[in-house]
């Protein structure tokens, strides 16, 4: 059976959820072969094998931590030469898309970014994308070379499918460009205890209607009751009410959770572009004519300062 090369996103051996989702998609079109690089790469093998990786290629070198992006592209290209896959799958983060684009240029292949689904086709894998601010859905395939495809988080379920997971060390020759951009310092991000925004199954976002940084405590309380991540609209971020790292939208982060709750967000096209592919959308807004209501599965016309606390209490009581 043909092999599919999957680039592993991990932190010191702890595999992140989007990679496990990629393994689910990879099994639809072939046998997954995973590539893990950097510190702790060998420690990913057990989890990857549990989720379908027939082989786990590893490479550990200081270059992966000391320099940006290019060493990982070098490793992926080396793995590509070893595997000769029918497709290369990469998590659709900012770094992942740069890695994928650089690899596609090197191997002379087509690139598809931000896929939300993947299936086998007679002439190669077919990717589904949400385009033009998620107003349209397209199905595409690469017509030249080996498809390099980045996939958005929450596009597929995480499914256990035990496989051999044989560990192999891949030899990587680093290019001259690999040491061009050096990491000089790192500052650990303070943990909120909440899920990563782009990977969360539930996202609760606040917008202009929250009316102040201090009122985001209401959004955070609802999010915490649901085990959700917290998002914000551009208006809320521009006003300084919440960090830019939590912005959902065309100029922020794109999310596709199982449940998205928009509180005090009017639904401008910029925001819709970042969350329109969410599986279930709930909006709370006192303006019954707000554009967000054209998009939602469930809408609540009401004052968020009354609705959100009641919703939080109801969630807590049901969980308790």
Image (cartoon, rainbow, N blue to C red):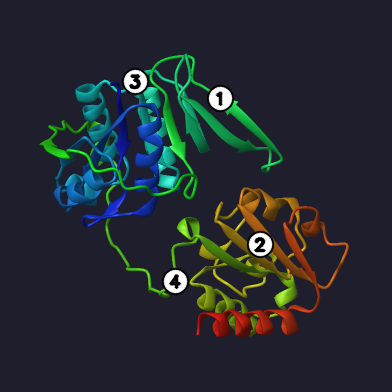
For label 2, the crowd category at 10 Å Cα-Cα, with few meaning under 14, some 14 to 19 and many 20 or more, is many
The N terminus - image quarter:
top left
* Quarter of the view holding residue 35: top left
Which residue is denoted by mark 3 in the rendering?
107
- The CA distance from mark 4 to mark 1 is 35 Å
> Is 300 displayed left or right of 221 in the figure?
right
Q: Nearer the viewer, residue 23 or 249?
A: 23
Count every numbered label the image shows and give the total.
4
Which residue is denoted by mark 4 in the rendering?
194
N-terminal of the pair, mark 2 or mark 4, is 4
In the picture, the disc for residue 234 is 2
- The CA distance from mark 1 to mark 2 is 31 Å
Evaluate if marks 2 and 3 touch, with contact meaning CB atoms under 8 Å apart: no
Residue 111 placement (x, y as % from top left): 46, 27
N-terminal of the pair, mark 1 or mark 3, is 3
For label 3, the crowd category at 10 Å Cα-Cα, with few meaning under 14, some 14 to 19 and many 20 or more, is some
Q: Nearer the viewer, residue 74 or 138?
A: 138
* Quarter of the view holding residue 206: bottom right
Evaluate if marks 1 and 3 touch, with contact meaning CB atoms under 8 Å apart: no
N-terminal of the pair, mark 2 or mark 3, is 3
N-terminal of the pair, mark 1 or mark 2, is 1
Which residue is denoted by mark 1 in the rendering?
140
Q: Nearer the viewer, residue 71 or 36?
A: 36
Say what secondary structure mark 4 lies in. Answer: loop
């Amino acid at each position: 059976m043909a092999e599919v090369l999957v680039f592993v996103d991990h932190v010191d051996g702890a595999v992140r959820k989007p990679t496990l989702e990629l393994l689910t998609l990879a099994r639809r079109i072939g046998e997954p072969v995973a590539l893990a690089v950097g510190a702790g790469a060998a420690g990913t093998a057990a989890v990857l094998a549990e989720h379908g990786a027939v082989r786990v290629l590893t490479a550990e070198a200081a270059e992966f931590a000391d320099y940006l992006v290019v060493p990982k592209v070098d490793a992926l290209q080396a793995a590509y030469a070893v595997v000769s896959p029918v497709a290369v799958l990469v998590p659709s983060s900012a770094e992942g898309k740069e890695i994928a684009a650089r690899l596609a240029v090197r191997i002379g292949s087509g690139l598809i970014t931000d896929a939300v689904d993947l299936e086998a086709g007679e002439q190669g894998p077919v990717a589904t994308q949400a385009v033009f601010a998620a107003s349209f859905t397209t199905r595409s395939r690469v017509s030249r070379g080996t498809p390099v495809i980045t996939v958005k988080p929450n596009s597929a379920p995480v499914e256990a499918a035990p496989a051999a997971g044989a560990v192999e060390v891949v030899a990587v020759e680093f290019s001259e460009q690999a040491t061009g951009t050096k990491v000089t310092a790192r500052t650990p991000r303070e943990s909120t205890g909440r899920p990563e925004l782009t990977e969360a199954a539930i996202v609760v976002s606040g917008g202009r209607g929250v009316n102040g940084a201090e009122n985001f405590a209401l959004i955070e309380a609802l999010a915490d009751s649901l085990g959700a991540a917290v998002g914000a609209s551009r208006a809320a971020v521009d006003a300084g009410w919440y960090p830019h790292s939590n912005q959902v939208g065309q100029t922020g982060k794109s999310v596709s959770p199982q449940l998205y709750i928009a509180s005090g967000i009017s639904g401008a096209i910029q925001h819709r572009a970042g969350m329109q592919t969410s599986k279930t959308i709930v909006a709370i807004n006192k303006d019954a004519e707000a554009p967000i209501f054209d998009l939602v599965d469930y809408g609540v016309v009401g004052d968020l300062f009354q609705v959100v606390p009641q919703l939080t209490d109801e969630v807590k009581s049901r969980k308790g």
